[in-house]
Amino acid sequence: MGGVTDEREARALLSRIAEPGDRRIGRLLRTAGAADVVAMIRAGRAGLEQDERYRVRLATADPGADLARVAAVGGRLLVPGDLEWPTQLDDLGDVAPWALWVRGTVDLRLAALRSVAVVGARASTGYGTHVASTFASDLAMSGWTVVSGGAFGIDAAAHAGALAARGVTVAVLACGVDVAYPPRHDALFARIAADGLIVSEVPPGAAPHRTRFLVRNRVIAALTRGTVVVEAALRSGALSTAHEAERLGRPVLGVPGPVTSAMSQGVHRALRAGAVLVTSADEVVEAVGGLGVDLAPEPSGPVRPRDALDPLSARVLDAVPARRPATLDSVARTAGVTPAETAAALGLLELSGFVRQGPQGWALASGAPR
Amino acid sequence: MGGVTDEREARALLSRIAEPGDRRIGRLLRTAGAADVVAMIRAGRAGLEQDERYRVRLATADPGADLARVAAVGGRLLVPGDLEWPTQLDDLGDVAPWALWVRGTVDLRLAALRSVAVVGARASTGYGTHVASTFASDLAMSGWTVVSGGAFGIDAAAHAGALAARGVTVAVLACGVDVAYPPRHDALFARIAADGLIVSEVPPGAAPHRTRFLVRNRVIAALTRGTVVVEAALRSGALSTAHEAERLGRPVLGVPGPVTSAMSQGVHRALRAGAVLVTSADEVVEAVGGLGVDLAPEPSGPVRPRDALDPLSARVLDAVPARRPATLDSVARTAGVTPAETAAALGLLELSGFVRQGPQGWALASGAPR
């Protein structure tokens, strides 16, 4: 196939030929455009050990087909700079995702603003499944988005709990957003895509390689304000999500269980090492909620972030920059509404925890406390 | 009856007429002898609100009869200054016990040197009972003395576990050491008295008043190097023992359980407030063991403190002062053995965690880390 010049297509192509979390590609993308990086790989000038392997994949990669394929299942590709891009992923530095394939109706950036990872063992006990589902329901009822993987056990229970409360749930997969893995989760993924989001760094149709699960965990940790481990044996993969969260300065929370249960041993070890013990969704919110959110009256029912906003507020929110604060006038100009309308909308958005006002102006309240 | 002049009889009398933990009596005893305090109460000059009530009790008090009564059940009265007096109780200051009635064959001071309180709810679950019994057995197997109350539930399970491992267990009661309360614990108390100790601040035959249970808890906390709460509802009395331990600077430890269990809610709250989460007896020992003890090779089986000592070591240990360190020569003189024999015995006693050597000489290793 020929060269790509479009940045979005180039990032789609990179997700097809390179493995997620490739630190050298992350570094190249700091100074070069994705199309240039693709050209460097093609020419063998990228200095990557995997150059050869990535070049082999180049021969059959077709980003246009991948983009059409994700669109066919109601999905899209997000890249940094998009309004929907969750900028907290930039905290991952060189291993930040360079693109995300998403499937579903919800706005990822808004959903992730108030989100918590609920993770744990595949071989969960009845107790763990019950707790994961209850916590997720209660979080959803308080307007929090639940983020997890797509595995049996705690992951599935968390999604089911959030969905039962008509909340937003996000599954971050290690395979393509159109791949049902494990296959028995076909129906669950369809429900998540209908009411929430399925997210992946790898393109449609991609298989869940073993290493991709671990690499995927950093996305779950970075998207959310904190990670709750519900059940985990001593060597559980769920603990890797907790370690990623800790590395990012996000709170790590653990649900205790019987000391006689192997499925609680990993959690207890994390709690002894400094994780915060939580016994309810309220305590989770207390631990991960930002200052503005804590002071805000909690919504009384499940809130789908974008649904909850009137059109004017949604328009103003889209105009608030993610990082550098902007003045009220600047936000008003970007949104194309009057300063008075902007001020009123920003006040409501601040109360709901979407934005925060600092000395330099308004910004998204997306970051976890560092 | 006439006036008492003997200090021990006077303290026996005080335990009959005054309530344990009476702060004003504690203060008087700092500067006056117990016989003088009794005389002041008798004369209405003690400045105690309870003067009148205490004087009423004086009319029928008979310390000689109480001492005979405790002797009849194989017991004795301990007062500060006795070799067997556990000097760590002095940490309680004005509310330190002024006498302890004890029943059993073990030396209280030696037993309490390496002791842990294992406490919890009366209405324990099968899980809590199992954990209390297992922890106590394992502690006993490692040469640690278990201290608890005499109630159903966690207290009873802890004693039973320690006894099953042929270890030393100490029950601190809110009634006389010859009173079986609850009555169904008659046989348990007999076993504890045979292999361990029953301890009380109130004289033989005294009933367990409601307030005495709470006051008793400070003795459990002060005797031991740390307190483990196995199960406790949110308003459980077991938490008062934990608060006393915290006030004394002793470690407070908690065993987690299911967040769905009301009997673990009090423990989880304590853990969220800073108590140390423990999942095994090893972790308890790690948290409460002093420096010398941690470095010492752990005994490989249950150790009855006095049993474990050869006659020479026991004699040398008796000569080691509790607080102000003494030189080797001074210990040798007090013990009446040669300095060389004393040095050898002290070395062994230090390895076993009984004594410690500081720059000023040798002292008992009885204090918890402050």
Image (cartoon, coloured by chain):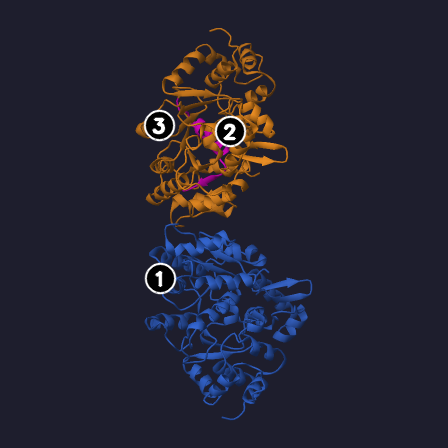
Chain colours: A blue, B orange
| Residue named by callout 2 | B317
- The CA distance from mark 1 to mark 2 is 54 Å
- The CA distance from mark 2 to mark 3 is 24 Å
| Residue named by callout 1 | A123
Relative image position of residue B318 (x, y in whole percent)? 51, 26
Relative image position of residue A244 (x, y in whole percent)? 52, 64
On residue B194, the disc is: 3
Dot 1: chain letter: A
Mark 1: amino acid:
Ala
- The residue located at (57%, 63%) in the rendering is A348
Is residue B62 visible to us here?
no
- The residue located at (54%, 18%) in the rendering is B49
Q: Based on the displayed image, in which of its 4 quarters is residue A197 positioned?
A: bottom left
Secondary element at tag 2: helix
Q: Nearer the viewer, residue A148 or A20?
A: A20
- Magenta region, residue range: B207-232
**Residues packed near mark 1 inside 10 Å, few (<14), some (14 to 19) or many (20 plus):** some
**Residues packed near mark 2 inside 10 Å, few (<14), some (14 to 19) or many (20 plus):** many
Q: Marks 2 and 3: same chain?
A: yes
Dot 3: chain letter: B
Q: Nearer the viewer, residue B129 or A321?
A: B129
- The residue located at (63%, 33%) in the rendering is B360
**Residues packed near mark 3 inside 10 Å, few (<14), some (14 to 19) or many (20 plus):** some
Secondary element at tag 1: loop
Q: Marks 1 and 2: same chain?
A: no
How many numbered marks are there? 3
Q: Based on the displayed image, in which of its 4 quarters is residue B75 positioned?
A: top left
Dot 2: chain letter: B
